[in-house]
Amino acid sequence: MSQHTQLAAGSGIVPADGQIADPFSGSACFAPASGPRPRRVATVGVGPSSYLRRAILWRVFGPPDVQALAPDAWMDQSANDGAVILQNPAATPSWEGLLDWAGDRRIVVDVQAAAVMAAAAGFELLPELAAGETQPCLQVMCHQRNRPVFPDAPAIDIVADPPVSCGFAAGDRVHLFLPSEGMLGLRALRNDEALQRFAARFNATVWGREHRTGGVALLSCPTPGGGRVTVMDLQAVDRRPDEAGSETPAIQILLSLLGQSPVTFGRFVVPPAHYGEWLEALDGLAGRHPRFAALETIGRSVEGHDLRMLKIARRPGLPVVLFTNMMHPYEWAPMYGVLRYVRYLLECLETGAFEADELLDCHQVWWVPAICPDGFANRCQQPSAINLIHNFPDGWAQAAPGHPRWGAYGAPNGLQTASPISWPGPAPGSQPETRALMGLLDRADGRVATVADFHENVGHLNFLHQAENLEGYIADVDYHADLTDGIRRAFRGRFHEHREATEQTDAFFHAVSHERTFAPGWESSWQLHAVARGAKAILVEAAGGDCTHYRTVRRTEHAAQTAEQILAAELGGLVRNPWGEDREVAWTSRRHPDNTVTVRLYDRAGNRIETKTETPVDGVVRRTIPAGGCLRFRIENFRQQETSA
């Protein structure tokens, strides 16, 4: 049994940063943030040139909004920022004094400072070091480079639901550690009688324990003024990133604790997956929802693996939205995002949630999770190194060897001089996987309205470059509105092609870049083949981050959100407000000046609170979406306008 396989035993996913989680766990969308986001953050004892201050806080809040309080007199100062970080304060009050001073603010305290403050209150909390080894490590492929991931690093078991929306839940395991010479360390509080008395006295919630020592690594206390104080090892955050990006989960948790939530980034590694485990998981999913889900085999791969397809429908015969994944096995992260989304759809159908009526009343969803299952074991191409995405008849010639688009790439006589990701095969439609999809469209006989093929780009930047804009701000409700608008505009041309691809920056590949433009991906012969048979087709590049053995929370959530928007775009769009406060959104309809739109507004619980049919003034729909709610708009004469656009 390989090292990868040993790590994977019974876990489904083994995150790179140490998290162990079930790929079916969690909802398709993060929960709304609780309370308003802080506009500024104050620090105590954080070095002016530290990584925490300059690279993280400046990037997220902006330099003018990061206030440094005097380390020796910070209790005498007022921090009207809503968030405070205490790392190395020169003056340390008792824990009661800290809670009283906190008021309604969110405060994060370093574990060492927390122990000193607790001692001043009569509780002898003892910090202890959990150590891990740098050997052995996993060498994972990332952007054509091997990078070390340390499975023996200290990790935190999330033992209770976090008090904030941070992307993790009870049952997850997260690697948080500070690399040092030959060792990986994490400071936690010893889980002893003193800590138990402390937790009882201050109504503290222990929600993270170091998985081997049991030390308390994440502990939160409510304040009398309605705020919250959380203890964690800030050294796991205040450090330069390593190549594996192991600092990212710590930053994700920190920013969530400060109220900059929901945070949709983070890195995870999985061992080479076993395709059989995926088939069992799909069987289980379909078996739990027999009224609405069914599995069928649409063909076999070169090596004889079954190509499975999951069908989700309220009733048969509806037009089809077809999702496809893993055309390129080394671009596999979005598969988990679409998996979460189809699970979410099935739950909506079972519970009668509004999405069932709004998204699945007029369409059904078909999902092929792995077009190239033969690449599961090595995250590589088909064993013959054929790029299946260019093996379809439509567009095959443009991808053939010698075409100006590829130059000399794709020569079939040896990978030493040829690009293994460019060869379209010896003839169009020559591969069984390709023929399986072609046959699927033929059997559907025009019922496939839309094809969305999910991929991911291969950037290698850390989380600071995975935010929604160049200033580093996390996504707001405009993300969903712009994503909806971008998908609509892409579909007007039936498929989308990048025409400027010389600067492949991280922002360039975002679904919503700093210019707020939608960049779904390259034109492919699979798209062209679907378009030639009457479907709309789009290639979706999951936004930002590393490829191959990594997946990110942000990329999987982007895939889920994009899948939802593509399904919603068949009749209009759906805009969610994930924040803890009401947000105004404006959506522009450019289809036709007399466009008629039915607008339905839902609250956090999914209750419809408004229904109105209108002709938007200047083509703009404006609404205030309640916290956690969503806006659904349906274009009444969608297809006629799409044809005439």
Image (cartoon, rainbow, N blue to C red):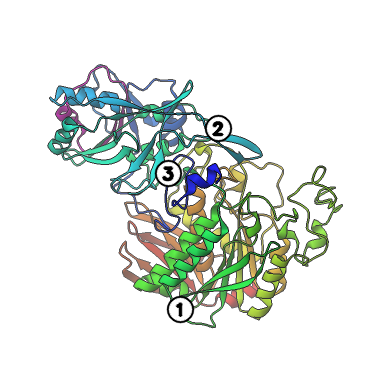
Nearer to the camera, 467 or 488: 467
Please give left or right for residue 509 compared with residue 257 in the image: right
**Mark 1: which amino acid?**
Arg
Q: Which residue is mark 2?
A: 243
Q: What whole-number distance in Å separates the C-alpha atoms at marks 1 and 3?
A: 35 Å
Judge whether residue 570 is colored magenta: no
Is disc 2 placed on a helix, strand or loop?
Answer: loop
**Residue 569: image x %, image y %?**
53, 67
The magenta stretch spans which residues? 84-109
Q: Nearer the viewer, mark 1 or mark 3?
A: 3
**Residue 122: image x %, image y %?**
12, 24
At 73% across and 50% down in the image, what residue appears? Answer: 421
Is disc 1 placed on a helix, strand or loop?
Answer: loop
**Mark 3: which amino acid?**
Gln
Nearer to the camera, 433 or 230: 433
Q: Is residue 19 visible?
A: yes
Q: Nearer the viewer, mark 3 or mark 2?
A: 3
**Mark 2: which amino acid?**
Glu
The local crowd at label 1, few if under 14, some if 14 to 19, many if 20 or more residues have their Cα within 10 Å, is: some
Name above or below for residue 35 compared with residue 572.
above
The local crowd at label 2, few if under 14, some if 14 to 19, many if 20 or more residues have their Cα within 10 Å, is: some
Which picture quadrant has residue 538? bottom right
Nearer to the camera, 595 or 390: 390
Residue contact at pointers 1 and 3, CB within 8 angstroms: no
Q: What whole-number distance in Å separates the C-alpha atoms at marks 2 and 1?
A: 46 Å
Which picture quadrant has residue 191? top left
Q: Indicate which disc residue 314 carries.
A: 1
Query: Which badge, 1 or 3, comes first in the chain's sequence?
Result: 3
Q: Indicate which disc residue 19 carries.
A: 3
Is disc 3 placed on a helix, strand or loop?
Answer: loop
Query: Which badge, 2 or 1, comes first in the chain's sequence?
Result: 2
